[in-house]
Image: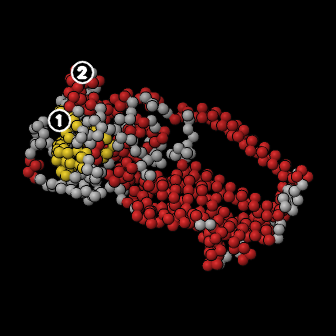
Amino acid sequence: MITAVEERQAGTEAYAPAVRIANKGKRLKKLKGYAPPVLLFLFILALWQSSNKLFGIEPYLLPVPTRIAQAMVDNFSSLMQASYMTFIASMGGFALSIVVGVLVAILMAQSKVVERSIYPYAVVLQTVPVVSIAPIIIVWMGPGLNSILLISFIVSVFPIITNTLTGLLSTEHNLVNLMTLYRASWWQKLWRLRIPFATPYILTGMKISSGAAVIGTIVGEYQAGIGGSDGGLGYVITVAATQLRMDYLFAAAIVSCVMGFIVFILVNMISSLILRNWHESSVEMEN
Amino acid sequence: MIQSKSKETEDHAYKEKVLEGNVTQSSVRSIVKLKGIRKQYNTGVLAIDHVSLDIQEGEFVSIVGPSGCGKSTLLRIIAGLGDYSAGSVEIASGDAKSKGSRDSGLSYVFQDATLMPWRTVLDNVTLPLALRKVPKAEREAAALEKLKMVGLEKYADAYPRQLSGGMKMRVSIARALASGPKLLLMDEPFGALDEMTRYRLNSELLHIWKDTGITVVFVTHNVQEAVFLSTKVVAMRAHPGRIREIVAIDHPYPRGDEFRSSIAFTELSASISSLL
């Protein structure tokens, strides 16, 4: 507890030099933190590269890293084209998830009856295996972007719904009372209180569903198969698998991973940017 | 809420009568009039019963009592935030429950500062005015003035997490003042603060009360705090919550440390404590 005297003196400018020094130390610490996983990665890579000589694994079953790298370079333009397609489709599905997910959560937050009637179906969306509904959607809507987008949406919407709902329902009770006292309208309560309050929750949902959206897209493209002519990474995987081109398959898998990772990092950055001023999770504590 | 209500409304004869013995001037207008308030929960538990209270404009009334005596419940009823089972509530010119008017003319300070962590201090204070769609420049000027009143104008752009508990409570008070209310309801606002900070905020609150001419209803479990601040202390008892006695504190304002250390203060505190 800060006493009365300290309260007056607590000017933020006074902290600035100390913070700068602390940041320098932090950067060094961060660098040291990166070292162990990088070393492990290099070690595994070396082991993998010599897997043929050391363990006698056939290269057509496990292509060595240099082969995979070569395959990446050889198929660079088609991989990039496919990545672009996948990125567009998964961002579309992800965006749809955010919009629909938040709207559904707002609807569910209105009353227990609405919540109870919608929730089971939202859970079904989460539990149904993608591979079982993807073919149905593709048959119905054709193997184009629309069906891929829909599959991506189905896979990624649930985390948004459930997290947003939790946020909306846990809004601080007295803040709601305060709004009532000032005769705030339903719209004002939602826009000025409930949505901002739920923002950290929505962002958590987004972090989870961003990866799911990419996976959903690739599964959808995979299911659409050869029919999906200007296909994304899922299509590349289908082609590479049917032709048993293991190096290309590995290359596609790695590119898929990297894309999921990049999308996650992007969402994370947006999240920190939005929450930097006020939320515990993004604020660097001094003690 | 499912609750049967047998609220007696519009008892005009009652208005003429002066309920409390210590009120002699009929020219002073009542701002809060409670008559026979009863609050029973759905479980059947009687929270408060037979509570009648008359508060005049410009008074500083404290409600003290042990926890569970229904003092906070009573404050919520005055604010129109809580339901009651029987009795009548009149606030200034209207009924606390009427949702018709855009301006209820009252403000509420909660036990916690209840600030919005995503808004700056200034934006927190402007909230009541923003909800009324007061133009931005106008509401910010008004908010800055209130922040000055609580000595936090330098922190207008800070976020709540950067403030201490005492400072947060000051922001909360500034926000309550921003809408220019006639009636300020405070629910144990300084309960969570250390004694030093509480003393300071007590004095500041009295200054604000004197400067603005606002009517304050202040709920606390701290008898000394109630005696120090109030023109009138309402002592409540629990199970069910009832008003035990209403004690007038006649000591003149401004009150300072000399009042706190006086014999009269000690005696008043002791006699009120014995009522609880």
Disc number for residue B237: none
The total of numbered circles placed on residues is 2
The label shown at residue B262 is 2
Q: Nearer the viewer, mark 2 or mark 1?
A: 1
Residue A119 percent location from the top left of the image = 48, 63
Q: Is residue B238 left or right of residue A120?
A: left
Residue beneath the point at 56% across and 66% down: A125
Three-letter amino acid code at the position of disc 2: Ser
Q: Nearer the viewer, residue A159 or A179?
A: A159
Chain hosting mark 2: B
For the C terminus of chain B, the image quarter is top left
Which percent across, then down, holds residue A201?
Answer: 52, 53
Secondary structure under tag 2 reads loop
- What type is the residue that disc 1 sits on? Glu
Residue A79, image x and y in percent? 77, 65
Q: In this view, does A233 lie above or below B121?
A: below
Q: In this view, does B236 lie above or below A91?
A: above
